[in-house]
Image: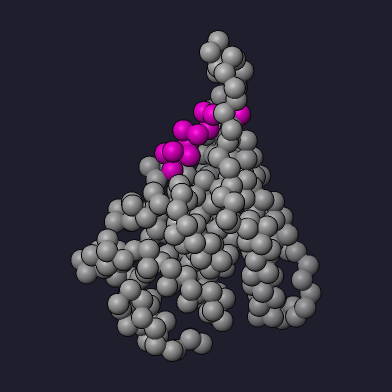
Amino acid sequence: MHWSEERNVSGLSIKSWTEISELLHAVMIKSDSWQLCLLLNAENIFHSMADILLREEDLKFASTMVHTLNTILLTSTELFQLRNQLKDLKTPESQNLFCCLYRSWCHNPVTTVSLCFLTQNYRHAYDLIQKFGDLEVTVDFLTEVDKLVQLIECPIFTYLRLQLLDVKNNPYLIKALYGLLMLLPQSSAFQLLSHRLQCVPNPELLQTEDGLKAAPKSQKADSPSIDYAELLHHFERVQKKHLEVRHQRSGRGDHLDRRVVL
């Protein structure tokens, strides 16, 4: 790989991407030593890995690594506390970690959306999905959307599904999910998400007498210290680089027209 300088990740000396791949594999197979590292230094590990991936020149490799890290973040039992920190984004540290992860997660569009779902940044998730119309839609891309839909049905996103009951205060969550639905071909994932959205209640039916009198609850506000517009521009820049590299590899040069590869 292009990056070979020795780094220190939470006390672990990393000399090559091969070693990083092996370490990530160790996490995935629940290595006892890595379980302990995740429990003690999870935030530092993810912060350091994201910093390294941000400078990685092999974009396809970076996308694969981001997907692996995201899977670990969303599914590892040891990272429950870290997920809670990111879900609320109440502290400067958690907001800084979100921005750090986001910049590297941009190597993979679908994982970027899943990070926004995790952090309850539903409006930004919707904005990202709107940008998907400008991306090259490949089989791999659609497969990742399919996997995200499956993940939304898992326990990790129970809170997100419950928020669908509060229709008036979560319009961008519902619009983002409908956006994913529009991206999918007619498939089992399409049917799964379609059935879930059919369960979203009519807000008029949920009105109670007390609710009619009460002032409307405001939806979760964006963190003022996070520049979401700048993050969206960063996402566009990273994805443009990915598109250029794919076209160069396939011999299409600078022709950046959108194509559906199915």
The percent coordinates of residue 150 (x first, y second) are: 47, 47
Instruction: Tell me residue 128's x, y (percent).
Output: 64, 54
Q: Position of residue 107 (x, y in %)?
A: 57, 68
Q: How many marks?
A: 0
Give coordinates of residue 228: x percent, y percent: 63, 56
Quadrant into which the C terminus falls: bottom right
Q: In the image, which residues are magenta? A: 157-168
Q: Is residue 163 magenta?
A: yes
**Residue 120 visible in image:** yes
Image point 56% across, 81% down: which residue? Answer: 57
- Which picture quadrant has residue 14? bottom left
Most distant residue in the left direction: 32
Residue at the spot 39% in from the left edge and 49% down from the top edge: 84
Q: Residue at x 66, y 77 (%)?
A: 245
In the rendered view, does 69 fall on the left or right side of 215?
A: left
Task: Compare residues 246 and 237 and report the one nearer the observer.
Answer: 237
- Tell whether position 117 is magenta: no
Instruction: Using the image, determine if residue 251 lies above or below residue 172.
Output: below
In this picture the colour scheme is one colour
